[in-house]
Image (cartoon, rainbow, N blue to C red):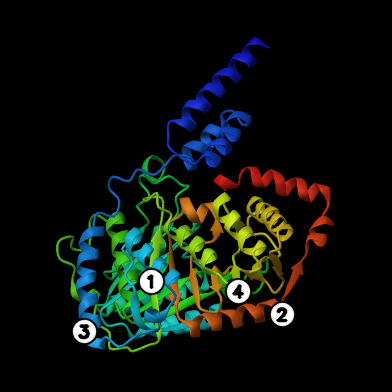
């Protein structure tokens, strides 16, 4: 008995030292304390792999150089296309403040006159993306959380091999955790013909440096520096509805043509140089062929914003909060994971209580049990505050979209949860175009035809056991 008590005291002391020696928010601190105290040994093993913070000293050293040269190219781009008033010049003062915020926190310039196409079906997306890759003549840069060794994965790999063999520069970054089951030897045919492939930040330091908890959740494709893709889809058969567990996969992705691709290209280059030290992009002079001037005159102004554990600013979360605070009439959100921190939760509650039409659409099935139960917990709480909660029934909804007043919107990789705000490397497009915003509203309304409004009364009918699982999962929400 005495030995047991000594072990408990030592474990608690070690837990205190372990958790409080690193600066983190209080919610995550107490969540880890709960794990370490209640799960001796096992909790410390989990912390060793997924609890430690990310060292930032060697991350993304090209940030300043890329920003300076991008500003030069942007000035040239504006001169080429002219200076006529664009929709983003006529937006409200509050949105201009958001544009300025992103410029300040993420050096995210306002890219004007883009052409943007929205994809909600994987078959359409990959068909178009592969056509663009087929037409590439200079460079193909791909970064995905998931790149599976399955049918669509092999189709894209074979196309990349073909293009690399023809002399096109091909570089691929994949997340080793998100692409679990895909080993680097899968990419050997591409590397054999001159392509370059790397797991994000490498794998040799996965435990000591990278830390398994910090994942490259970004989805970036740039082709010849002229065409770019960003959104929620990954590369895998399940994203084409080929997995019975999920059924039809409903996601949202963007194809961008115009100066908005500059930021996607820059983000890829920063991530590449943090990952591959053997074949880096030049850190003194960025080759302008990666940032060709566009002759496109589209209607869409946007900012590409990235965030991750290499910064404490949580830029995308700040953008989400600004969107919520900007709403005057409607705020429609689609997210597979709804685990907001207190600041975002309060913003959503305030919006609903102020009479704004707040709607949130989530899946009706889990892909991660704990995460889904926590999502249900917050959905129930928000429903009590007047938010309309919809369960999507036609397969699995994985879209990460926000539309405000049919005026402005966000589409990208970041979910409405702690992990996307603080732990993952994410990227979103913030769009200032009523045409795109209205189109996203129309997509939301179509999805409502396949969804069910879950009222507070329906939440109350859930079993006590289900409510217990939701509450228990919520306790771990800061570290899920």
Q: Earlier in the sequence, mark 1 or mark 2?
A: 1
Q: Dot 2 corresponds to which residue?
A: 449
Q: Is residue 182 visible?
A: no
Distance from the alpha carbon under mark 1 to that under mark 4: 23 Å
Q: Dot 3 corresponds to which residue?
A: 79
Foreground label between 1 and 4: 4
Q: Which quadrant of the figure has residue 192? A: bottom left
Closer to us: 204 or 150:
204
Q: Dot 4 corresponds to which residue?
A: 329
Q: Is residue 64 above or below residue 440?
A: above
The single residue placed furthest to the left in the displayed view is: 284
Q: Earlier in the sequence, mark 3 or mark 1?
A: 3
Distance from the alpha carbon under mark 1 to that under mark 2: 31 Å
Closer to us: 348 or 462:
348
Q: Dot 1 corresponds to which residue?
A: 303
Distance from the alpha carbon under mark 2 to that under mark 4: 22 Å
Quarter of the image with the N terminus in it: top right
Image position, residue 90 (x, y; %): 40, 81
Q: Earlier in the sequence, mark 3 or mark 2?
A: 3
Image position, residue 342 (x, y; %): 58, 50
Q: Is residue 354 visible?
A: yes
Foreground label between 2 and 4: 4
Q: Residue at x 19, y 72 (%)?
A: 72
Q: Earlier in the sequence, mark 3 or mark 4?
A: 3
């Amino acid at each position: 008995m005495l030995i047991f008590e000594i072990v408990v005291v030592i474990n608690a002391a070690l837990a205190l030292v372990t958790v409080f020696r690193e600066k983190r928010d209080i919610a995550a601190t107490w969540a880890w304390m709960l794990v370490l105290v209640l799960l001796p040994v096992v909790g410390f093993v989990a912390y060793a792999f997924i609890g430690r913070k990310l060292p930032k000293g060697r991350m993304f050293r090209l940030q300043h150089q890329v920003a300076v040269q991008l500003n030069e190219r942007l000035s040239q781009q504006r001169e080429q296309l002219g200076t006529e008033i664009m929709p983003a010049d006529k937006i409200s003062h509050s949105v201009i403040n958001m544009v300025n915020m992103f410029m300040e926190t993420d050096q995210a310039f306002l890219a004007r006159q883009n052409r943007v196409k929205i994809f909600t079906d994987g078959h359409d997306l990959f068909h178009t993306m592969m056509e663009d890759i087929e037409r590439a003549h200079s460079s193909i840069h791909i970064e995905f959380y998931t790149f599976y060794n399955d049918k669509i994965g092999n189709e894209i790999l074979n196309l990349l091999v073909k293009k690399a063999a023809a002399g096109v520069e091909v570089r691929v970054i994949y997340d080793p955790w998100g692409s679990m089951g895909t080993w680097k030897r899968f990419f050997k045919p591409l590397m054999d013909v001159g392509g370059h492939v790397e797991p994000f930040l490498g794998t040799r330091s996965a435990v000591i440096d990278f830390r398994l908890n910090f994942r490259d959740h970004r989805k970036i494709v740039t082709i010849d520096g002229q065409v770019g893709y960003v959104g929620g889809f990954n590369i895998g058969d399940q994203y084409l509805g080929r997995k019975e567990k999920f059924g039809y996969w409903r996601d949202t992705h963007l194809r961008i043509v115009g100066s908005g691709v500059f930021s996607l290209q820059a983000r890829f280059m920063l991530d590449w140089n943090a990952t591959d030290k053997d074949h880096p992009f030049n850190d003194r002079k960025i080759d302008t062929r990666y940032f060709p001037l566009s002759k496109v005159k589209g209607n869409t102004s946007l900012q590409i914003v990235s965030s991750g554990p290499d910064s404490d600013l949580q830029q995308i979360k700040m953008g989400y909060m600004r969107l919520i605070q900007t709403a005057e009439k409607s705020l429609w959100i689609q997210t597979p994971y709804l685990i907001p921190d207190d600041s975002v939760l309060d913003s959503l509650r305030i919006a609903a209580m102020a009479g704004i039409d707040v709607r949130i659409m989530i899946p009706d099935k889990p892909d991660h049990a704990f995460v889904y139960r926590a999502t249900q917990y917050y959905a129930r709480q928000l429903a009590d505050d007047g938010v309309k909660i919809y369960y999507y029934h036609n397969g699995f909804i994985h879209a990460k979209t926000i539309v405000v007043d049919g005026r402005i919107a966000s589409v990208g990789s970041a979910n409405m949860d702690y992990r996307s705000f603080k732990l993952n490397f994410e990227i979103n497009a913030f769009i200032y175009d009523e045409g795109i915003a209205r189109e996203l509203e129309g997509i939301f309304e179509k999805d409502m035809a396949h969804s069910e409004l879950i009222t507070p009364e329906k939440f109350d009918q859930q079993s006590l056991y289900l409510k217990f699982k939701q509450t228990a999962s919520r306790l771990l929400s800061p570290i899920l």
